[in-house]
Amino acid sequence: NYWEIDYKFSIELYTVTTEIACVLGEFESVKELSLIILENAKTLSEKAKIYDTQILAFIAQNKVSEAINTALDILNLLGVKIPAQPSEADIGAGIGNTHALWTKIGIEGLLTLPEMVDPEKLAAIQIISSVMPVTYTAAPILVPMFTFAMIELSIKYGNAHASTFGYASYGLILCGAVGDIDTGYEFGQLAINLLNRLNANEFK
């Protein structure tokens, strides 16, 4: 009954142990420990940490579809709804909505946004950053949708370390898909400046 006696210690212990099992490649242990945590965790943000570890475990095993589907499912629970098969209309709407969001405060204004503190929003942007690298090759149609979600989360709830990845990815879309090289470059520069501001070296 240790979950009742000391919940805080139990959730931290199981979460860290699951992360260690993932690093060591003990994927069956990751699965077993994750089930225990998901049965006992009290908050969605605590559960999201475990889903993030599961995503990394799937990626390490080259189970890319499972990783992407898990990400989409937990993001939906966290209030970030992204279609599994976005249409051209979805992407076009995302480009327009994202442009409207950031132009209200300007690129310089994005750098000075407060830091993100909402645990569920932090979990959402972290999950996107975890799954994005494999999405480039396995499901590239999702890359812009994930990117738009990162930008929206950052503007509405503040910058996180993963926002640097989001701004850089948005710059890539502006340069490659939209053809706006100058603004794309500015977003790349924004990503570097924010990385230094937040000391987000894990995204360098």
Image (cartoon, grey):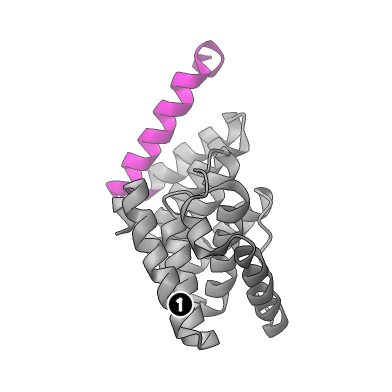
Q: Is residue 104 left or right of residue 198?
A: right
Disc tally is 1
Judging from the image, what secondary structure is the residue with disc 1 in?
helix
The stretch of residues the image draws in magenta is 1-27
Q: Is residue 46 left or right of residue 12?
A: right
Image spot of residue 62 (x, y percent): 39, 67
Identified at 42% across, 59% down, the residue is 164
Identified at 48% across, 49% down, the residue is 52
Evaluate whether residue 162 shows in this view. Answer: yes
Nearest the camera: 186 or 127? 186
Residue type indicated by callout 1: Gly
Q: Is 24 part of what is drawn in magenta? A: yes
Image spot of residue 18 (x, y percent): 39, 39
Image spot of residue 204 (x, y percent): 29, 59
The residue wearing badge 1 is 184
Q: Is residue 30 left or right of residue 82?
A: left
Picture quadrant of residue 142: bottom right
Evaluate whether residue 134 shows in this view. Answer: no
